Amino acid sequence: MGNEIQGEDICEKQEGWDASDVGKRIPKRVTSQGTYFNEMIVEVFCQMCGASFIGPTREAGGFLGGHECMHAWEISQIIGREDGLHE
Ligand SMILES: [Zn+2]
């Protein structure tokens, strides 16, 4: 048995993931940033605008972080316009 991962689905896709791939693991994925191993495919959504994303954990984090930054900026613009306060 050793270090084998038991009972987990493997996804060989390197792109184009959809709902049927959620919960599977990508053994190896080579990108221009680096090589990812054993990454889980997850589905996440943005609580601010309802956009959703399916893909590797790393990209899901980027999706959430990107939306969070963008919506925080939008809110700061609204607040700035209404009361002129700045942090
Ligand atoms: Zn959003």
Image: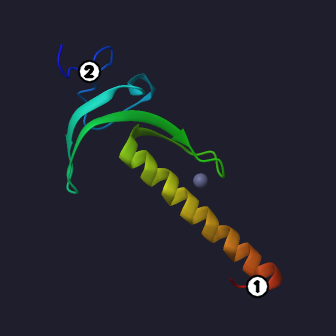
Residue nearest the viewer, comparing 9 with 2: 2
Is disc 1 placed on a helix, strand or loop? loop
In the image, 58: left or right of 81? left
Residue nearest the viewer, comparing 15 with 76: 76
Residue annotated with mark 2: 5
Residue 87, horizontal then vertical, whole percent: 68, 83
In the image, 23: left or right of 81? left
Image position of 43 with respect to 77: above or below: above
The residue shown at (33%, 14%) is 7
Residue annotated with mark 1: 85
Residue 36, horizontal then vertical, whole percent: 23, 44
The residue shown at (57%, 64%) is 70
The scheme the figure's colours follow is rainbow
The N terminus, quarter of image = top left
Amino acid type shown at disc 1:
Leu
Amino acid type shown at disc 2:
Ile
